[in-house]
Image (cartoon, helix red, strand yellow):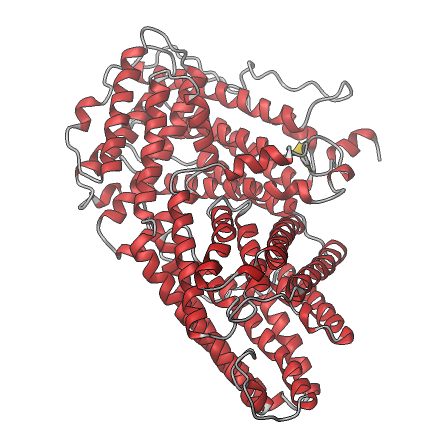
Amino acid sequence: MSTADIRRHFVPPALDQGDPPSGLRALWHEMKSVPGRGKNTARLVIITLLCTVIGEVFRVPFIAVFPWIAFLLAGNDQGTTLAVAPMGTVMLVIGIGITILIFMVSLSQPAVRLPLMVLMAFAAGFLGQATTLGPFLNILCFWVFFNVTLGDSAVGLALTTPVFIGDTTDSLVPDLLLMPPEEALVRITLWVGLLFVIAVTILVLGDRLMGRDPAQAVREGLSSRLLACSAFCAGKPDAYRALFMQAQAGTGGLARLHALSVKVHGAAPYHAAGRALIRDVSQLGLLLLAWRRIMPRTPETEPYLARMAAFCEAAAAAIRENRPVNGLTDTMPDAQPDAPGVEPLTRELHRVLTLIAVVLARPDQPDPAILPEIISRPRSLFKADAFTNPAYVRYALRLTLAVCICYVVERLTDWEGIHTAILTCFVVSLETLGDTLHKMVLRICGCLLGAAAGIGSILLLMPYLTDIGDLLLLLLPVVTLGAWIKSGSLRISYAGTQLVLAFFMCVLQNYGPTLNMEAGRNRVVGMLLANVVLFMCNALIWPRSVGSIARRQMTVAADCLADLAVHESPAGSLVDHTRDRLLGAFSAASGTARGALVNDILEPGKAQHHAGQPLDSDLVTRLQFVSVPILMTASLPFGTRTDDRVRMVFHHYQTDVANWLRQFGHWIATGEDRLGLWATLPMIPSVMTDGMSSEDKGLCTSLAVWSRVFSEEARDLLRSVLPLTPEDAVPPNPEESHAHA
């Protein structure tokens, strides 16, 4: 194979491992206060301590697990709790029923019980990945598996403990030792179910009284984006950076909060207005970023930008105060800056501002014609590729193997205290190696910190505790720290949950002071064992990198842009549902790719095996910039009297752009035809405008401007991942025309 052939079959771009950020600097950034974090922390602390008081006063079994259930299920807003709690309760009840049935047929038959345990572990992995209710079905299967493992403990206890009459109030369940193993297991299972229901009830009531309203969070998010737009138009420092960061974040977070607000408030009319505002405000930010690209700040543009800043500020105040506002159309900019090719951008800005003004004038009864299109998809339990995608089965087999290894180690060592290893396998194992390692790190850090705090409390403070008030003072600082971490971003929140659990396992062993430090030791050992086993299974058996997710989503994003490039918007319409659908799909795919790349740095030794420049979040950002000129070109209006020459040039150029984008997506996925991306880069079209009308000349001018912007952005994108070497061919000159009429 020649050198040229090798280059044409280039490997996919490697993933950027980057420089590891400073641990202290990154931790300080994640621990900083943000709006709503303090209130959510206080809510978690109050709910957790209230559950602790109830457990201590009424001497409920599993005193350490009872308050932690409420802590675990608590979200950062009311909608999350209301979405999780009912479904979690249903899965718990179903799991209790399945567990009792398995006990009835297999408690005295290990040969039957063990295959059922393996089957439940496989089902947890497969159903968790291949179904639309993955997380809940994963918890259901884990719950059944974990309960069945208690059968070994109960049988062993029944064989080794003589029946006696006496005080058993210190046992896990009162009078547990006086019961047959079958009845004891059923009682344990029912007790856990009851504790779950009580904790969920307290959590729901606490959220209704103190929880953050997701609708308010949506209003705050939209308001902050509009204020960033206003600051940009006003020329304030750092406004561009804020606008840029919001564009990178996309609309996924706001859309999720909006969906949760529906669960809290019901199907109110203004929810349709919320969807429209999320769409329009995000598009406004992208358009202003494009403005900076083609329009410098001049005295001629200042009046236009000043009116736009006033519009955005008034709209932000109306959204923040949750009130309708009339007269916004009077503050819209009218006079357009006189610059070549700027007319498509100003027309698109006027369209978006008009939509925002119309929605805010009647948010309770928005015009159906301007609302986003809602596509109802048939609901199905299984995903479309549930039985054809081998990744689901491979993940289930990896999980099953890890669980079985931990179970065998526990039984062979007769060390029941490390049963948390089994729980760790179910909780920590995720789809990719990077995501799994990220959760491992959080679990290890949280568990070690919580166990250290618990053992330190036993040694230094536990002998001095006299009543429940002293216990609450002991719990308060650790629970506050765990709640503060849990209220942070997804990058660290799981560590707070593990910190609180490990601390509770140490200090809440009985209904009084304890000096037993075995619980903390056992939890740490079980957690470390599971993490080692999981890492070996995920790294050696069908390893799946975060790069596979990023590449697939980048390919989807490129295909969406290709479809947008050849799409023709209907003339005179404020809303183009097809265009909005393509932009939404592009935003979702690029956001998923960016999220997948976050944990790339944790995957060892992968990037070094690839040649070329790395694929990182910067590539996602550059592709987002490419989308703006594509949108502008696709939005150019064609009239019935548009010259055929103009139509032909437009058609050829848009087809070339679409083909190039699909070729780029193919290279991201396979690495094939590297130099072809340079060779087929669409050139700037030109048209002989002799004898054309002024409208057609304006269309040609706009096409030339925005095709030049596309060429610049595309070349910057290629230079970031495919730098040319002296041996490579010289890229085509974008100044040359590919179409003349």
**Identity of the residue drawn at 63% across and 19% down:** 732
* Quadrant location of the N terminus in the rendered image: top right
Above-or-below relation of 453 to 627: below
Quadrant position of residue 142: bottom right
Q: Quadrant of residue 22?
A: top right
- The part of the image, by quadrant, that contains residue 323 is top left
Residue visible at 59% across and 22% down in the picture: 716
Looking at the image, residue 710 lies above or below residue 196: above
Q: Is residue 372 left or right of residue 509?
A: left
Q: Position of residue 572 (x, y in %)?
A: 26, 32
Q: Position of residue 393 (x, y in %)?
A: 65, 65
The front one of 688 and 478 is 478
Residue 66 seen in this snapshot = yes
Image location of residue 293, percent across then percent down: 45, 18
Front-most of residues 397 and 42: 42
Q: Residue at x 29, y 24 (%)?
A: 641
Q: Looking at this view, name the residue that lies furthest to the right.
A: 1
One can see residue 652 in this view:
no
